[in-house]
Image (cartoon, rainbow, N blue to C red):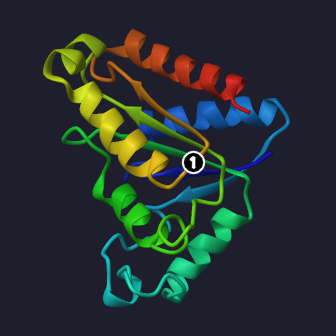
């Protein structure tokens, strides 16, 4: 299977990237192929200009060349995996802007459209631990926002939202997060 791995983190030397790399190594080890989308390094503009704004009366709208290029990249692959740090109990604006601009009306939803991949995973790296997220309902909020509000809304048959907890808890915890990412990659597909 060909996977598009989309990463939104400004530093290549970060735990988010270590998670993406571990996941990628594991899926490649299982015979899958990957294509990277490093939104930061590529300079992806997350702002929604008028030419990429959804047109609720035209499901066949032609979006900007930048968005068409992203759509083509998605179509070259068979699955999408997004890797991002949890900031303010959600994904970074860069990742959200990529979804806002590219997963657009008439292409990923609306007018009978569905995102073109049956399998989309979202791997979020969180500073807090699982108990602290559950205590305040942040875990449920992320699941509702990402899995229900984006992945299921776009009719993805096999969505998966994983939160990898404890990135601020020291070296042992970060090693466990990377190991968890590798295990997820080994289970992919």
Apparent side of residue 18 relative to residue 118 in the rendered image (left or right): left
Residue 37's image quarter?
bottom right
Question: Where residue 4 sits: x, y (%)?
Answer: 65, 53
Q: Residue at x 54, y 51 (%)?
A: 155
* Image height of 81 relative to 67, above or below: above
Is residue 43 visible from the viewing direction of this image? no
Question: Where residue 96 sits: x, y (%)?
Answer: 35, 58
Which quadrant is the N terminus positioned in?
Answer: top right
Q: Secondary structure at mark 1?
A: loop
Q: Residue at x 19, y 24 (%)?
A: 137
| Crowd class of label 1 (few under 14; some 14 to 19; many from 20; radius 10 Å) | many
Is residue 113 visible from the viewing direction of this image? yes
Apparent side of residue 155 relative to residue 166 in the rendered image (left or right): right
Q: Residue furthest left?
A: 136
Q: Nearer the viewer, residue 172 or 6?
A: 6
Q: Residue at x 62, y 55 (%)?
A: 36
Q: Residue at x 30, y 51 (%)?
A: 92
Residue 169's image quarter?
top left
* Image height of 51 relative to 153, above or below: below
Which quadrant is the C terminus positioned in?
Answer: top right
Q: How many marks?
A: 1
Question: Where residue 40 sits: x, y (%)?
Answer: 42, 61
Question: Where residue 11 sits: x, y (%)?
Answer: 39, 49
Q: Nearer the viewer, residue 2 or 7?
A: 2
Apparent side of residue 35 relative to residue 44 in the rendered image (left or right): right
Q: Nearer the viewer, residue 39 or 144?
A: 144
Residue 57's image quarter?
bottom left
Which residue was labeled with disc 1? 156
* Image height of 48 relative to 122, above or below: below
């Amino acid at each position: 299977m060909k996977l598009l791995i989309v990463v939104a983190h400004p530093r290549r030397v970060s735990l988010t990237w270590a998670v993406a790399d571990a996941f990628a190594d594991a899926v490649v080890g299982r015979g899958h192929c990957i294509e990277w989308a490093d939104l930061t390094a590529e300079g992806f503009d997350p702002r929604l200009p008028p030419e990429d704004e959804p047109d609720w009366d035209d499901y066949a709208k032609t979006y900007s060349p930048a968005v068409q290029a992203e759509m083509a990249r998605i179509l070259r692959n068979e699955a999408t995996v997004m890797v991002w740090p949890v900031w303010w109990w959600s994904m970074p604006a860069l990742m959200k802007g990529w979804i806002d601009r590219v997963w657009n009306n008439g292409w990923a939803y609306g007018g009978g459209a569905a995102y073109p991949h049956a399998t989309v995973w979202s791997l979020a790296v969180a500073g807090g631990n699982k108990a602290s997220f559950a205590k305040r309902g942040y875990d449920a909020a992320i699941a509702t926002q990402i899995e229900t509000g984006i992945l299921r809304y776009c009719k993805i048959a096999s969505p998966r939202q994983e939160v990898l907890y404890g990135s601020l808890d020291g070296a042992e915890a970060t090693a466990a997060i990377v190991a968890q990412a590798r295990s997820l990659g080994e289970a992919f597909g």
